[in-house]
Amino acid sequence: MDVPIICTLTGPELAERRRTVLDAVRKAQVRTYRLANGYACEFPVGAEMLEKLETLVALERQCCQFLAFNVSQALTAIRLEVTGSPEAAAIIEDFFGSPNKE
């Protein structure tokens, strides 16, 4: 069963989410990669960054059930993968940014 592409946040709630959580995460992004079904973003390693990403993922899973999130940590970076159906690609790019230009 496909999950409809619907965010359950109201306009003001979405603006608040962007201002309080998403903008801080986007500013910390080191690199963004296009995946076949979404984007992968890399962030600096650190407990505070990991906590911010885990908070963001927990919040987004509540309102955007059509997206899948995966957070992993290596020695050099924390990686957040946000994936979904082809129809969700524009939404993912709007929230998490487009790939870095090489």
Image (spheres, rainbow, N blue to C red):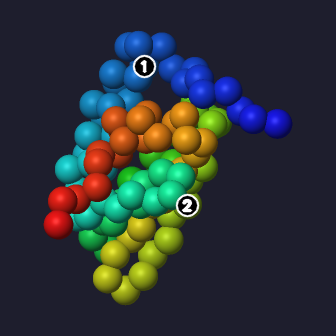
Q: Residues within 10 Å of mark 2 (few under 14, many from 20)?
A: few
Residue with the mark numbered 1: 13
On the image, the x and y values in percent for residue 56 come to 45, 46
- Residue 101 drawn above or below residue 68: below
Vertical comparison of 32 with 92: above or below: below
Which mark is in front, 2 or 1?
2
Q: Earlier in the sequence, mark 2 or mark 1?
A: 1
Q: Residue at 60% across / 49% down in the picture?
A: 68
Residue situated in front as seen by the camera: 71 or 52: 71
Name of the residue lying farthest toward the bottom: 75
* Mark 1 element type: helix
Q: Are marks 2 and 1 in contact (CB under 8 Å)?
A: no
Q: Amino acid at mark 2?
A: Asn
Answer left or right for 29 relative to 6: left
Query: Residue 74 sits in which quadrant?
Result: bottom left
- The image quadrant where one finds the C terminus is bottom left
Residue 78, above or below 95: below
**Mark 1 belongs to which amino acid?**
Glu
Horizontally, is 54 left or right of 26 in the view?
right
> Between 80 and 59, which is closer to the camera in this rendering?
80
